[in-house]
Amino acid sequence: MSIIHRAAAGENGELRWQGVPVRAYGSENSGADRATRQIMIGTDEASDNFHMRYFAVQPGGYTSLDQHAHDHGVYILHGRARLRLGEEEHELAPGDVVYISGNEVHQFFALEQEPFGFLCIVPAKR
């Protein structure tokens, strides 16, 4: 089933989409801190090939330290971050694109005084 998720008013400097739940992404379930996510394309849309998620991290927060067999495509929408990618660290800004290969250790840390937000595309089957 095809669907359009319309942009909605943001909150706390984060983007939002109408009708898409803001899901927990924090220490109770992932090891992240001050982070949220919305799944814009996923199982609810019956997407068989890929999923697209929006992650937002408040200043001083971070995503979980992850390592998965699947690869990721990441597009930075707003804010700045430091990315741990394997043994290296990189600073990211809006418009940057990151390919994270399978089994690569990765973690994003929000910098400065504004939220950091990015789109992440992953395989539907992982």
Image (cartoon, rainbow, N blue to C red):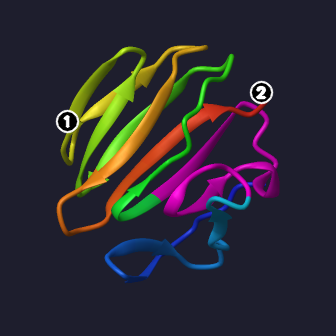
Indicate the secondary structure of the residue bearing disc 2: loop
Give the secondary structure at mark 1. Answer: strand
Question: As displayed, is residue 122 above or below residue 20?
Answer: above
Which mark is on residue 112? Answer: none
Label count reads 2
Q: In this image, 21 relative to 10: left or right?
A: right
Cβ atoms at labels 2 and 1 below 8 Å apart: no
- According to the picture, the residue beneath numbered tag 1 turns out to be 91
**Is-magenta flag for residue 41?**
yes
Q: Is 54 located above or below residue 109 in the figure?
A: below
- C-alpha separation, residue under disc 2 versus residue under disc 1: 28 Å
Observer-side mark, 2 or 1, equals 1
Residue at image x 30%, y 32%? 97
Mark 1 residue type:
Glu
Quadrant for the C terminus, please.
Answer: top right
Q: Residue at x 31, y 45 (%)?
A: 76
Work out which quarter of the rendered image holds the N terminus and state it.
bottom right
Q: Which residue is mark 2?
A: 126
Q: Is residue 13 magenta?
A: no
Q: Position of residue 122 (x, y in %)?
A: 61, 32
* Percent position of residue 90, x then y: 23, 28
Residue stretch in magenta? 29-55
